Amino acid sequence: MNDAQSKIYDILKARGIDAENADGIKEEDIPEASERFNKLMDIYYSMKVTADMEIPYWYNRLWWENDGDILEVRRARAVGGAYAHSTPTVLPYEKLVMSKTKNFRGAFPFPWVCASFFNSLAESLMNEVDAPAESEADAVSVVGAGGGNVTESYGDIISIAKKFGMRKEEIPVLVKVSKYWEGISVEDISDKYAQMLPDYDQFKRIMDAVVVMFDSFAIPQGREVINYYMPLQYGFDRIIQLCDEKINETMGEAGEDGILGMSRGYYYAAMKEITAGLSKWCDNYGKRAEDLATREPDEEVRANYLEIAQVMHNVAHKRPSTFREALQMTLCCHLGVVNEDPQSGQSIGRLGQVLQPFYEKDIEDGITTDEEVIELLELYRIKITCIECFASAGVSGGVLSGNTFNNLSLGGQNYDGLSAVTPLEYLIVEAAMRAKTPQPTLSVLYDEKTPEDFLMKAAACTKLGMGFPAWMNNQTGMNFMLRQYGAEGMDLYDARAWCLGGCLESAPGCFMPLDYNGKVTMIPGGASPTCGTGIHFTGLPKILELVLTNGLDKRTGKQVFPPHNEKIDTYEQMVDLWKKYLDISNRIVNRINNMQMDIWRKYNMPAVNSLLKPDCFAKGQHIGNCGSRYNACINFESCGTITFINSLASIKKNVFDDRVFTLEEMTEALVNNFGFKTAYETNVFSPDFRESTESASKYDRIFAACIHAPKYGNADSYVDSLLKDYHMFMLHYLPTLRSYYGKPEYLCQISVSTHGPQGFVTLATPDGRLAGTTYSDGSVSAAAGTDKNGIYAIFESATVYDHSQNQNAQMNLKLHPSAVKGLSGTRKLLDVIRAYMRKGGFHVQFNVVGSDTLKEAQKEPDKYRDLMVRVAGFTQYWCEIGKPIQDEVIYRTEYDQA
């Protein structure tokens, strides 16, 4: 028994509880979610993901009506006008209203960003011919066939991107709207200029081989933290007045900036337009609720409609005066941002700290109760869960697995360096425990100053099997902020405001003074553009494969990289060739992604998001013009780190150190999948399934040596040192790449769901993984089934380098529910988390579910409609995840002791 266990047992004994039976002691029963929540979830479970053309129609119409106007003003009128013309839908059980579209689970295309996909698809449907060939990334991405996904067309419903259903009657509108953007979308313009580069063909070969997963224009916003300060402090009417004041001050004045100074006046004109659009959007919901009230016979439902109307009319014009109004205002702004671009990972930030002043006043005044606040937070969870991202199958399935990563962070430190935990954050966790939805996911910023009872409550939530909260090291995050953004003026105060943007992207923030209830509260919010959109998910093992095959993709027969034509005689030579191919990929992909994002910020600059970031409003510059406080936020995203490291260890050990066989012999074995059938043939993507062919015996010796080579996650310095070497190389190499903001890039290590499709296109690897199976998940998770020495051995391996030198490091663990049962199980789980945080680990998240349950759910998904699992930085309904990722999650090492 360790000290922590002894302490908890002493406490229990002092309270008259037999310490010997502590494992059987249960926490308090979790109350049922509210009746409203359950009724709305019944609707959610019955709904399919629907794409419609209402917002694209109005955006298109207003864009062309304003042809010739200043671009940022034209853009704001199109976005704001589309919101103002969208149909408001209000359901009788709601208290919070507003959605992405008129549909409960709705989304819509953005042909002004990416037109070719929609044009080719829509024309094929109109002409009743076969759909065009998919991109390689789309073709190898698998979308879950259950839940709300529309993976196949039926009746009058057309499946688009293997996920969204669109009515046939809307296809002509899709065709017409998309046609306007042919040749002038962000995708088309950037591709036009990219073709001027001499290495453009190299870029296409890299993308076709899925060495890199997707282009930056696919999801140009997100992976950042939203900032709610402006509307909470001022309200929409006052913001419009401020815009008029700023127009009077800046229009026609360059100040001391001869390049962008004149843009300030146009920025404020644009912000006036977008604010008016948001205001009208809210007013329309109020009018809709009033209309429903006049026709509603049930007095209780009628009263609810009238409450909604009052809230929405107030939010449309005034700063919020209650917690409910403040929460509704943040939802409006959040939807406003996620609707202006295809995006994922537009994180909510530290909502419980932002809204604490409103909650506190309502409780003091007796306006509301904790139970009423919890109900609102439950209903909020449904609204965020309904957010969908309309994108290609490669993005929707291969990257997102249907999730949009709206992350809500808890804890950390406040402006004064004390624990930032608020009473409202306890209720946010409570609402998540009652109302089991995948979004918003929760993330605890673990700090030694965090109250113990809050940590225990969060750990109890993690135990419920929803995969959240995930746990982040607050001090490590702060250190990364100071390291990465110090050159832009990041100080300790702003470093304390950081939190997660997207599933796991550390994002900079700032504190702003909210004047409410007779006092000033420093509230945190986002202070940067997207902390992504650099190089999206490079398959590290795939590049190693191409080194061994002289740049030739044996799966497709296409030459991806120039042949190096070298006989590889040393381990160091092989690693140098890997670095060379990595650099070839990075240089051309980074240049073209920079062009894509530069075209985006010129023609498709954020409107709502540029209103909400306080520094944009202070400077008079939109996000694309470096209006945010911090702009060194663009990253390089990796995939398959531990598969790559284990493969290096196997080659080093078997080929160069022990000389068990030659590199040529190993390469032949890899090309022939060690004599086993591939995952393409078996449709099983779990590494524990192997079906032999006639040639299996030929490669028995090599396969056995690869399987038994040193593996990461066992506190083995032989392989762990290779991980450290890799990170030191990337630390110094990646800043040589510059973003479209002219800032150095850095390492982001999240697999999301890309380890599925990128594993699919990769041959067998030297660690013994078979062709087509998934890569290792995360970035410091052990490859499934290879960690033999327990959780703490993985922690030793994971912390051989400083996690604060990168944007993140991802650790996924799977526990059997029996390992953390009872109150003592919660304490054990928290002890595990604390041990990793104290060793310097950045992130850990848990699936608390048995593999048997997952296997049954895979066989009969309809019986497990509400089962959720943690994938890699996000939670999703099991039935909406593709089979390759399901297989990988099932096979993750399952610990029966914490």
Image (cartoon, helix red, strand yellow):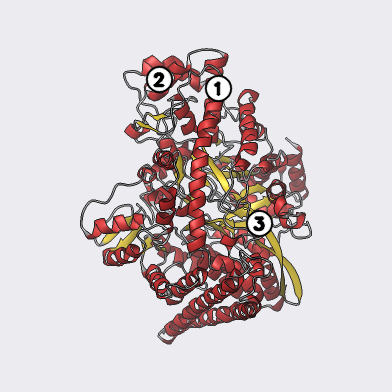
The amino acid type of the residue labelled 1 equals Gln
**N-terminal of the two: label 2 or label 1?**
1
Q: Nearer the viewer, residue 80 or 514?
A: 80
In terms of sequence position, does the residue under pointer 1 or pointer 3 come before the other?
1
Which residue is located at x 64 percent, y 49 percent? 459
Label 2 packing within 10 angstroms: few (<14), some (14-19), many (20+) = some
Query: Residue 414's x, y, as percent?
Result: 74, 59
The quadrant of the image that shows the N terminus is top right
Spatial separation of the CA atoms under disc 1 and disc 3:
39 Å
Q: Amino acid at mark 3?
A: Tyr
The disc placed on residue 863 is none
Q: Amino acid type of disc 2?
A: Glu
> Where's residue 777, x and y in %?
52, 39
Cβ atoms under marks 2 and 1 closer than 8 Å: no
Query: Which mark is first along the chain, 2 or 3?
Result: 3
Q: Position of residue 119 (x, y in %)?
A: 31, 58
Residue drawn at x 51%, y 56% is: 598
Read off the residue under disc 1. 573
Mark 3 vs mark 2: give the one in front.
3
Q: Secondary structure at mark 1?
A: helix
The residue where tag 3 is placed is 630
Could you give the CA–CA distance between mark 3 and mark 2, rounded to whole angstroms? 49 Å
Q: How many other residues sit within 10 Å of disc 1, few (<14), some (14-19) or many (≥20)?
A: few
Of marks 2 and 1, the one in the foreground: 1
Q: Residue at x 47, y 61 (%)?
A: 341
Residue 668 badge: 2
Q: Is there any visible trace of residue 34 in the rendered image?
A: no
| Quarter of the image that includes the C terminus | top right
Q: Is 762 rendered above or below residue 297?
A: above
* Kind of element beneath mark 2: helix
**Residue nearest the observer in this picture, 519 or 114:** 114
